[in-house]
Image: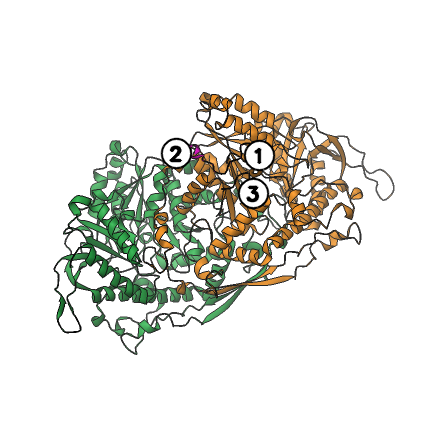
Chain colours: A orange, B green
Amino acid sequence: MEKNRQASIDLSHHLSGVAKARTSSPLKDLQKYFGKEGIIRLAGGLPSPEYFPFASITADALVPDAYSWTPDNRSPLAWIWNLFSATREKTTQVSIPKYPNKPEDLNLATALQYSLASGIPQLQEIVKTFTTQVYKPAYTDFKTFVHTGNTDGWFKTVGTLCNPGECVLASEWTYPSALAEMRPYGVRPVPVPMDGQGMRADALHKLLSEWDADARKMPSQATRHVHDPSWSDWCDNARCEEEIYDICVIFGGCATHLARAFSQRFEDVIFVEDDPYYFLQLGPYMARAERSPASVNGNDNEEYYLSQLVPSYLRFDYEGRVIRLDTFSKTIAPGCRLGWFTCNPVFAEKLERQAETSTQAPCGFGQALITTVLLNWQSAGYIRWLKGLKVQYKHRRDFFIDCLAEQFHLETEPAIHGMYEGCDVYHASQRSRVDKSGYLAEKSHPVVLFSFVPPASGMFVWLKINFDNHPALSTLGLEELENKLWVALAEAGVLFGPGNMFSATPVSEKEEGFGHFRVSFSNAKLEDLKRAVSIIAQVLKAFHQLD
Amino acid sequence: MEKNRQASIDLSHHLSGVAKARTSSPLKDLQKYFGKEGIIRLAGGLPSPEYFPFASITADALVPDAYSWTPDNRSPLAWIWNLFSATREKTTQVSIPKYPNKPEDLNLATALQYSLASGIPQLQEIVKTFTTQVYKPAYTDFKTFVHTGNTDGWFKTVGTLCNPGECVLASEWTYPSALAEMRPYGVRPVPVPMDGQGMRADALHKLLSEWDADARKMPSQATRHVHDPSWSDWCDNARCEEEIYDICVIFGGCATHLARAFSQRFEDVIFVEDDPYYFLQLGPYMARAERSPASVNGNDNEEYYLSQLVPSYLRFDYEGRVIRLDTFSKTIAPGCRLGWFTCNPVFAEKLERQAETSTQAPCGFGQALITTVLLNWQSAGYIRWLKGLKVQYKHRRDFFIDCLAEQFHLETEPAIHGMYEGCDVYHASQRSRVDKSGYLAEKSHPVVLFSFVPPASGMFVWLKINFDNHPALSTLGLEELENKLWVALAEAGVLFGPGNMFSATPVSEKEEGFGHFRVSFSNAKLEDLKRAVSIIAQVLKAFHQLD
């Protein structure tokens, strides 16, 4: 982590043609005088704030400890009943007036005016401090500045780093919207095999060392490390981040002999760490019987909590080749459409230019309201909020998997190859049931219906459906079968995320015999989650014609 | 207007390669089941609204008639003193709870959740109704849907209509940000000469009929009618919109014989009407002595007011070739980052796909707050608000030009050629002054320092600076001289918009002897506007070495 650490980094030669053509904005040229005291500004098309029809905005915000962090000791199941009842009424009131008492105070006259794309100053400061404290970047002059959510952050990043024809290295299963964004611009995903910790370091090394620039036509330039926790965090042990970073340094063309040898073949490898679920690191799943309140240490202090989080790539980024995307979508609300970039100053300047000529600054209402809540909560309060949130989603995950354990017979097995490698896989088969009369109503069926690894973070369980024994596999084919099951589930009243949407390559190229679904436990009411699992059991039984 | 009017329009062959590559989003595929009652939705990464830390948001909103529409009859100058004192305190309170009383009510649980890029339903309805009532589009199945402000709207439009190497026909002076957005993507502006009403129909006809596809390499595809009122609305008479529209129909390749003959030479001509100042149509300027309260008819009803507005191109758009961009930036606040597209369904579908993979929906806080205010005001209230706003900006324009008339000797002359053609131009020269002792302190100087046409709409006066007699013109050149004057003004305490930023072509290709500045009267305090004009007079005098 300390190797070659440098304070200042220039990767400007890695910007795409589009980014190079982006000159300083006219606004920027005026900035020297914009700040001048007493100057009369007649340059911009700024409406007078008098005419903003909002005199003030007030919000009832939840308090940082609205959700419990300490375990409930009353009974092992008490948390279920307390899950939502917690402290919904514990709110604090925050207000934003149009005109501030002190000029430096947050106010609507400024927040609702045209402003720099990098965000209102108070929010910039919050974001910079938070990034420094939580991610501890490996170099000092990194930049943070806001964007309008990670989807747009990724869109701007691809437009800044990639020319048409270039490639993005992506985990073989990745976020569909990220793929949909780059395809129209002729930027192509190149899948990298995964194991239980996400992208495989050995596979990445092999791919880069065998890279054929002629066949790929254009150099590879951006790696997306989709930190979608259904993938990269199945297992709870430390990830191979540093190993992956080091491979990219070797092949990246910056620092080493080997790199120069490769520099003819691709320009560089830049990391994009799209990490919306970072604060939902839930820890390992334990079966209900094994769980005890003691497993949650309610006395964790802030620094201890942060030190337990899987590190960001920023921590290893001594060459400035990471662009990290953070968002408030999962920690405050998706409608915020607010997040932030962390990257080196050269990339930052070009990304900001792009924002100025497209989205401009994020919405002033959102910026002002989130900033005022964060100012009210203060840094420690926001971290407390994140801890409470983590516990909520952990409960939800546990509840959902508990439901699976009730409906199916689950057996665990350590995976020794494939995308679960290094994790304990749960195989689900039909459960034998004893009916009221005491007879065995169904025979235990040995067929594995689906497999999964309980996610160590995020909002999703990834189900790998076993179609191997399905009577129609040979006639219908895998894709059609997956589609049929998805529709059967939807018709029965449960909506899953179709797995093929997440594939960086056509599903037909994937391993045979398995379909995939992404299932979210983040949003449904608990009784609906329970009902959904029961529907899944019925539909799978009918689908596999197990009667 | 009635010719060939059709209910349904398909211009899909005019979409760029990028747009064609944009397929339906995965989200869209799920929509059939999304709406299904009682279905348990486990597909998306939606956080539970329980965890949105906003229990409710309340705003003190100004009332629709906060600003006067009727003239103040107390004295011809009374409006100056009442300009800001008006009714700042007249507010109404609106609230948005997290959970609604009735499911169809606006609420934060929905507004702050992930949602369709087209906007929250209540806002979609408001925008559609308003567009129908105000712009009266010429065909029935037009679509409206929100975007994150016109800058981003234009960015998305260029990305949907233009491939690299293609051209945008633009007025010779146009909005700098629009130029800055398309240049990195290799989309080039082709300037069209202007007169006092904006783009010249005869010049456009000439340009299109002489279009050399070989020299331009790729077909022209989008026309931007920058409805920047410093340009297109100097004069108050009806514009030549319909004439321009008809020319584009002829050359556009859709309907006529002539078109087919031209279809080899460029693909089509699409209008993009970027129109942020539409509701600041201020009417003609009259010298202070000629103004009377009676010139404002306070009894105008809604329909009469709307009928007096210069029509949108939508009104003539019987072939669906107009994409109109509306924004709340100038009528509510720039920080809204909210506006809407109006266009044919084919373009709408592709623009929405682009939003889904970049900005997604506009910020939920902004959408919810603006929607709740507009619901409170109702349609008639919003139109009343726009009328009040217009009067405010009219006062500001009149005040600024009155100040110029105090500091300079103004003479009017009908322009018979060039970009002021059809308007009365004001030429400003140094004013002779009588000092306290009664002697002529300075001789009246016949040199015209600058010329302008009082804008009939918007927030800006465009100053055409006469450098013809400047001693250093031959040595320094025009651009350097304009730059020197801009810096001299800034150093003296007044910030102008540099004219060269607004030029669709390098300034060196423009008519010789003139520099240009865009001056905003929208935002500064009145006493600062007055002081600015006095500084301008001093700086120009020194700059031209008139002593």
Q: Which residue is mark 1?
A: A2
- The C terminus of chain B, quarter of image: bottom left
Residue B454 or residue A428, whichever sits in front? B454
The reply to whether residue B254 is visible in this rendering is no
Secondary structure under the numbered disc 3 in the rendered image: helix
Image position of B205 with respect to A105: above or below: above
Residue B313 or residue B536, whichever sits in front? B536
Between marks 1 and 2 in the image, the one whose residue lies nearer the viewer? 1
Q: Which residue is mark 2?
A: A17
Q: Seen in the image, is A279 located left or right of residue B343? A: right
Name the residue at 79% across, 42% down. Answer: A290
Secondary structure under the numbered disc 1 in the rendered image: loop
Tell me if residue A6 is in the magenta stretch. yes
Q: Position of residue A544 (x, y in %)?
A: 70, 33
Query: Marks 2 and 3, how far apart in space?
Result: 37 Å
Image position of A447 with respect to A74: above or below: above
Q: Are marks 2 and 3 in contact (CB under 8 Å)?
A: no
Q: Earlier in the sequence, mark 1 or mark 2?
A: 1
Q: Chain of mark 3?
A: B
Residue A495 or residue B507, whichever sits in front? B507
Query: Marks 1 and 3, how far apart in space?
Result: 48 Å
Q: Position of residue A399 (x, y in %)?
A: 72, 46
Q: Main secondary structure of the magenta part?
A: loop
Q: Seen in the image, is B466 located left or right of residue B331? A: left
Indicate the amino acid at tag 2: Gly
Q: Position of residue B474 (x, y in %)?
A: 15, 45
The residue stretch that appears in magenta: A1-14
Q: Position of residue A496 (x, y in %)?
A: 62, 41
Secondary structure under the numbered disc 2 in the rendered image: helix
Name the residue at 78% across, 50% down. Answer: A77
The reply to whether residue B326 is visible in this rendering is yes
Q: Which residue is mark 3?
A: B30
